[in-house]
Image: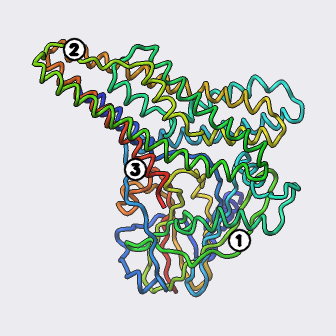
Amino acid sequence: MKTILFALLLLITVSFGNVSQKRFNVERTPATSVQTIAEDTISVQVPTQSQNSFFLKSGAWQELVSLQKKLRDKLTAYLKAMKEGDDKVIGWFFLICFIYGLVHALGPGHGKSVVAGYFLARRGKWWHGVSLGFSITMIHTMSAVILLFVLFLLARAMVFSTFELSRLAIEKGSYLLVVLTGLILIGASIFNRIKIKQEESSNSIIETQASWKELLAVSFITGIVPCPAVALVVFFCLLQGLYGMALLGALAIGFGMAFTNILFGVGTIFLRQGIDHGAHKIGFLTQNMNMIVSLCGGILVSITGLLLFFSVSAP
Amino acid sequence: MMKPIIWICLFFSASLYAHPHIFATVFLSIEFESSGEMIIKNRWVFDELYSAAKIDAVDINQDGKLSAEEWYEIERSVVQSAQRFNYYNYLLMGTQFLASNGYKNCEVKKEGASLVIYFDLNFKMKAQKEYTILTFALKDLSNYIQFDLDMNKVKVQAPSNIEVEYFTDVLEGLTLFKAFPPSTEALYLRFRGK
């Protein structure tokens, strides 16, 4: 009797009137003209770029996105608890901020491609990777904090909309500068190769070392775009009256993002060292290989800048 | 030698498409009218962090309460501005993505700590004797808003003169949806008049 009742209940739940949840053969259903079915048909333009990359296809990115959502919900809960005087969650709040930053930086616009591209184009030591990864992220984080604090003090009622407008303008400028940085790196690698050829000293080593001056310039150009994720957390803290937490939470997120960027920077430096070592070992036209890798780095930086620029400029 | 470089480039180019900063949980119900018209009822529940920022942003006089004009500002900036993307509701019939005839019954409110937006999208259609197949997916292709939608929970209703069958599956392999991540869940429907 129970089984019959359950089956009846299931039937009622699954189908409503003439509606049934059932798999049908899509290919065997004859196609009918859209015009005969849809009245006043206006079609929607859907972007044609493919997202069939192995990364998105694997579902790993969707997992990361879901994780970010869960972490952000936790952050919100901790902030609300702190607002109500629960100080026990402070440690957890900073830990979640750090993890959130670490995961969030895997998304675009946080400097990974530029860091990796730069260290493909320029030989560096591990501390160069740490410096560039850290400085890009700190500028990226603090630009959001400063912009938000200033707007909050000056134009409380317009904070969010003004932040979004300012961010968009800074983003466009910054991404164009990233394109320019990539072009300079491409130009420099071609120029160096020509110079070596002219001097007919094919055995000499091309000096393509990272310099502190360049690191500082790249950090500023890439990092100046304020991070919207940091901004939202800071803004939420300010709305709750948790001013200190706004700053400290942003710093914890910044450290998390820096960890990811440093990992990419140092990883690319070791990759570049491996490529140099391999090319030298097999005696494969060391200078040509050096130019190819440097070009790849410059191209990666330029393409990153271009894609980011178009992603914010799309109508 | 070049393989590691290519893998690095592929990794970065993939992540360039995905950058969610706003999260919204979506609840949908699809209703067919006896004329064949299809209505997709959207309910978007935004995450608390964004909700707090958005509500505060439109509270121009900062009195903590939103007036009708201030609620409308949210409708304008969130729903109206999404018109060019068909409100992120992509409905494929044959080889065409159908545009809705605007949105109706929009309601913006605060439920608990979340900003919630209700609206209906109407698609004028005629039910034929033969089945018509529709494929539906909801996604912000710029990935700025991450919509969380469980297609298995979508309610589908139809009057007695229309027969509807549906199932859920991913979009993988559908060339017309190549702009979507292949793992995106979609609703496959077919309907006909009796």
Q: Residues within 10 Å of mark 1 (few under 14, many from 20)?
A: some
Q: Chain of mark 3?
A: A
* Residue type indicated by callout 3: Gln
Residue B185 is situated, as x and y percent measured from the top left of the image, at: 50, 55
| Residue bearing the label numbered 1 | B106
- Locate residue A3 relative to residue A287 in the image: left or right: right
Front residue of this view, candidates A124 and A10: A124
Q: Earlier in the sequence, mark 3 or mark 2?
A: 3
Dot 3: what SS?
A: loop
Dot 2: what SS?
A: loop
Residue lying at 62% horizontally and 42% vertically, measured from the top left: A228
Residues at discs 3 and 2 both on one chain? yes
Q: Residues within 10 Å of mark 2 (few under 14, many from 20)?
A: few
Residue lying at 26% horizontally and 30% vertically, measured from the top left: B3
* Residue type indicated by callout 2: Ile
| Residue bearing the label numbered 2 | A205
Dot 1: what SS?
A: strand
Which dot marks residue A51?
3
